[in-house]
Image (cartoon, rainbow, N blue to C red):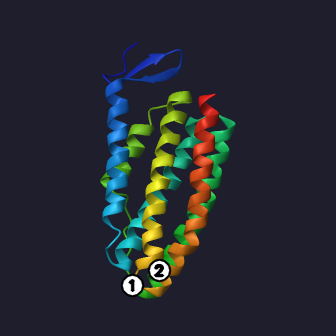
Amino acid sequence: MRLNRSFTLRTGRHRMSAFCRASIFALMATSASLSQAATNDSPEKFLADALQDGRAEVETCQLALKSSHDAAVQAFAKRMIQDHQAMNDRIVALAKQKGYRMPDKLTVTQRATYTALKPLSGHAFDSMFMKHNVSDHESDIKLFSDQAVHASDEDVRALAGDGLATLREHLQLAKQTDAEIKK
């Protein structure tokens, strides 16, 4: 049964076409490059980008709790929701203290990534979800590292520095979980 040009229904699971995989990887690469573009911007821009990224992380992890049946992916998603929500709360509090206005919507790229993941399930979902988390956390580490050293605002430097250890741990967990699902 054909669902559309990108997906074919097979024994209850979606199988991705080469076009779909290429599209998702292109979205991930765009997301990483957009994150990197913000490294020399204002503290307000960094906080806004970090908040949007954290919110996107929470949304895709909530999707993982519905779409994945793999225990390792589920555990990873639960941990990411907990940690990223805590960081989001810190960002919102700091932004409010500084009088910064934070965005209330995700970026086009973040929405597109969610949309690309949403129809997937099973191993196809797990594979793309974990690849996304590896690349997203790699770009987040670069962004937070830069801000921890170069941010013009002392409080933003401290927040970025505090977030680095957690992001590095997330990257390790993402890589480990990705390796587990490939076995």
Q: Position of residue 174 (x, y in %)?
A: 58, 47
Residue 62's label in the rendered image is none
Q: Nearer the viewer, mark 1 or mark 2?
A: 1
Name the residue at 55% across, 72% down.
89
Q: Residues within 10 Å of mark 1 (few under 14, many from 20)?
A: some
Name the residue at 33% across, 33% down.
22
Q: Are the residues tagged 1 and 2 within 8 Å (C-beta)?
A: yes
Q: Quadrant of the N terminus?
A: top left
Quick one: SS at disc 1?
loop
Residue 156's label in the rendered image is 2
State which quadrant residue 90 falls in. Answer: bottom right
Asked if residue 156 lies left or right of residue 166, the reply is: left
Q: Relative to the observer, which residue lies in front, 1 or 135?
A: 135
Residue type at mark 2: give it. Val
Q: Quadrant of the C terminus?
A: top right
The residue at which mark 1 appears reads as 152
Asked if residue 71 lies left or right of residue 10, the reply is: right
Q: Position of residue 121 (x, y in %)?
A: 52, 30
Q: Relative to the observer, which residue lies in front, 59 or 136?
A: 136
Q: Is residue 64 visible?
A: yes
Q: Is residue 89 above or below residue 134?
A: below
Residue type at mark 1: give it. Ser
Q: Position of residue 144 (x, y in %)?
A: 47, 68
Asked if residue 177 lies left or right of residue 142, the reply is: right
